Image (spheres, helix red, strand yellow):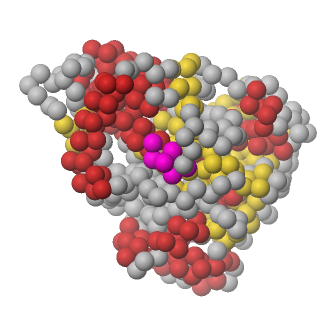
Amino acid sequence: MGPYILVIDQSTTSSRAYVFDTNQRIVGTARMDVTQHYPQVAWVEQVAEEIWATCLWACKAALRKAGITAAELGGIGIANQRATTIIWERATGRAVDNAIVWRDQRTEASCDKLNAAGHGTLVSERTGLLIHPFFSASKIAWLLDTTPGLRQRAAAGELAFGTVDSFLIAKLTGGRVHATDATNASQTTLFDIARNQWDDDLLALFDVPAALLPEVKDSADDYGRSDPGILGTAVPILGVVGNQQAALIGHACFTPGMLKATYDDHCFILLNTGSDIVRSRHRLLSTIAYRIDGQPTYAIEGAVVSVGGSLNWLHDDLELFEWDEMDKLAKAANGPQPLFLVPAFVGAGSDWWEQQARGGLFGVNRGTRRPDLVRAALEAIGYQSNDLIETMRKDWGRDTEISIRVDGSMVSSNWTMQFLADITQALVERSPMVDVTSLGAAWLAGWKAGLWPDKAGFATRRVTDRQFEPQLDATMRQRKLHGWRDAVQRVLPTASTR
């Protein structure tokens, strides 16, 4: 096998492929969008075969751009949107229905019923998660219950469940391998993260047949070889990881206390807690950051639901600004007249998880102009991040300095990153790569193939595009935080009690 690593990065909106050389440089890349389907309000679906087709096209295009063939690959890594649910026929590899995307809300009523019956404690203790429509278990049950004959076929072993990684592995291997990694398994609400195995009590609770489930492997492991007819030769699949955990790895956050934040439409923040499962007192999530050589490393995870979404609203719907003038407008805003935008457009994420919450804009007066609205949307990114990081630190219980390693489409805004540093009073380190996710999956596969260095060596090669140090004085910071928290309490009445 050759020295290159091919990475499939299958996200919610697109399928990307990257070819890395041994110096960890991208030498070929391609992407194709994936269609989102909205059959009903709050339902989000994708066609599983389209996910596969776009990934396959991207892989072949990336290899062409790199000027290499699959025979020069040392391995394949996969990073994927988590908790998106697919059930397919083992015999044919065909999905029985559309994939239900992680952010689909169709199972809200069934989740509410389980929570009302008092099952939340069991799920939290075993999985580190909440009973929530985001995760896979309730989606599996919905598919089995709404398609005639599926339950019987599942019990008979004719069907397979998987998140997107499992489906891609099955497709790549011609159906020979049905597996997932521990990070993806930990997002299903069916996996005991302490014992590192599927949990019979949870399978019974959600009414999911064990015959559907994939084998759970390490994040760097042998997932079999691709069918030679797919890429032209058989290539070992050696790294598999959920996309947010892949970004944590890509930032080389291997030491407890290291934190990554990815800013796109949403923001996902993960704090490495090492071998400790930190049980959140504030409804954050405990999850597996990665599992190597059978040893899991854990993390606290939280989400900011609306990041880029706030700006998309101002740009697409209200047509208030152009993207290239965003930072300029933020600088021109009227600082002495604070404006607070609480962007709970589709409910509030961590650590509130209030689905019915809606957004609010506070401090508007006759002098409010469009720069003030843009600045308020950008400041909301910092405020929400600060709230989440403070909560993580309370849960972890260690008073140590942190730096925030950031990536994603929103981090190109220097103004936003400086405000993030100011309001969190933390060093913000920006990666030169917009998408660090692919680098994390590449390291897993490259290390497993013996082509890339170990964790310590990988960390020494890490490059930072720019660092942002806190500059805001303490009095002004507290004034801003007080105004923000007052606005949050107006939108989320329970905020004052937590």
| Prevailing secondary structure class for the magenta stretch in the rendered image | helix
Q: Tell me: 398 left or right of 252.
A: left
Q: Position of residue 135 (x, y in %)?
A: 51, 62
Q: Position of residue 379 (x, y in %)?
A: 34, 30
Q: Which residue occupies 82% across, 53% down? A: 293
Please say if 214 is above or below 219: below
Q: Which residue occupies 11% across, 28% down? A: 365
Q: Position of residue 235 (x, y in %)?
A: 84, 46
Examine the image and state in which quarter residue 445 appears.
Answer: top right
Q: Tell me: 122 left or right of 94.
A: left
Q: Is residue 392 magenta?
A: yes
Instruction: Residue 143: tell me if it is visible.
Output: no
The residue nearer to you, when weighing 111 against 71, is 111
Please say if 305 is above or below 283: above
Q: Which residue occupies 30% across, 56% down? A: 497
Which quadrant holds the N terminus? top right
Q: Position of residue 488 (x, y in %)?
A: 27, 45
The residue nearer to you, when weighing 13 against 381, is 381
The residue nearer to you, when weighing 223 against 364, is 364
Q: Which residues are magenta?
A: 390-396
Q: Is residue 192 magenta?
A: no
Examine the image and state in which quarter residue 260 appears.
Answer: top right
Which quadrant holds the C terminus? bottom left
Q: How many marks?
A: 0
Q: Which residue occupies 39% across, 33% down? A: 382
Examine the image and state in which quarter residue 31 appears.
Answer: top right
Please say if 364 is above or below 93: above
Looking at this rendering, what residue extends furthest in the right direction? Answer: 1
